[in-house]
Amino acid sequence: MAQKPCLADLPLLITGIAKPFREQIRLAGVPAIPFRHGVAAAGARGRFVVFDSRRVSSRFDARIAKSCGLETIDIAPLDPTVGSPISRDRHANSHGQRTGSPSFLKSLKDALESNGGVWMRVADYPFPFQSLLCVQKHAAVHPSAQTIDKLFNGLPVAEFFRVSNSRSNDWLFDSRHRATASSSNTAAFAWARPQYAAGLPFFDQNGVKDGFVAEFRNAVDGRSSEFPLLGRVAWSEFQIWWQVRGRICFEAWKQHGTYTVHTDRGFGGFQPALELWRGSHVATLPLSEGRITFEDQGLAFARGLPKHPGGFTAACADWCFTMRRKRAVQLAGARIAS
């Protein structure tokens, strides 16, 4: 079995990072711990320090990190909101405290990979699922929008999926993945395929009887072979899974094509999945308790999927940013007109 090098590729060591960015990293399932803890704790020390040069204390920690031979990644250049209409709109800014910025996780991933690091995350769903259909048998226990958003620390996931459940959700996908209906498939299936490919879940909110989720829910049983990695769970079970997922932290090392991953927490009876990204390609494998090793050459990478490397919460945050940007531009235009 391969021996672990001294410094782990993950978790990331973070210092001086604003809450929206910390939340995006956490919701993405990428392990991260405070810089001071990572340096002090033997065996939990990572080699990548993520800092914000706009903060004095963060710059100070970055200098300490460099003196210890650690790699540093500055998020200031990764924040596209600087100088944008959004950064000048107080209302949009306060609303956006939960969302960060749309390219942050993708840019962080690119910076990490360009410095020789790896982008691994706990997948959004248990292994081997690519998406989940969350349903309830009794209308009385269907989750409200507030209940859904609370699970994701205020991120407006319910609104995101309410819009995506509409009959014009092409804004979610580029031309390669847009929904197209034909005589051989229903409109609901044409709508569902790109959502499934993108790894988005299907939330049945408040027992809605119309809309694409309802149509898809009623039709999928007879054509489940088209969605082989779609799981069906009750909302209550999804809540438990998401809470368990949020407590999973792992350490990861890569050395000469061999990966070593270590976890020290139980999974509450679930089988989590681990995503390993390389550029736009992703490999998915089961995450086991304790220590596992796997070889680079034995991984099967999927290509061309419209998945976000930060998962569906990152896709939701991107949507929030887009809506905020539109609003900020509209307000800026209104001020000029007045």
Image (cartoon, grey):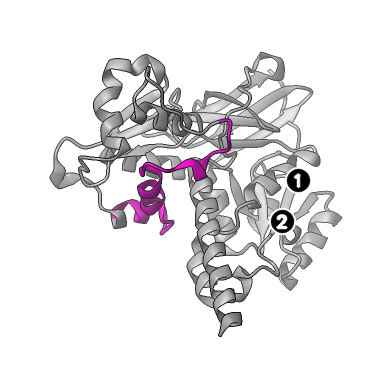
Tell me the element at label 2: helix
Among the 4 quarters of the image, the one containing residue 332: bottom right
Residue 257, image x, y percentages: 75, 22
- From the viewer's side, name the closer residue of 37 and 173: 173
- The residue located at (65%, 34%) in the rendering is 252
> Which amino acid type is marked by label 1?
Ala
User: What number is the disc on residue 111?
Assistant: 1
Residue 21, horizontal then vertical, whole percent: 59, 57
Residue drawn where x is 40% and y is 21% of the image: 227
* Vertical arrangement, residue 303 with respect to residue 107, above or below: above
Give the residue drawn at x 72%, y 63%.
Answer: 52
The disc at residue 78 is 2
| Cα–Cα span, label 1 and label 2 | 9 Å
Q: Is residue 39 left or right of residue 224?
A: right
Quarter of the image with the C terminus is bottom right
Magenta segment range? 147-176
Q: Tell me, yes or no, whether the highlighted magenta stretch contains residue 173.
A: yes
Position of the N terminus by quadrant: top right
Residue contact at pointers 1 and 2, CB within 8 angstroms: yes
Q: In terms of depth relative to the viewer, which is nearer, 10 or 44?
A: 10
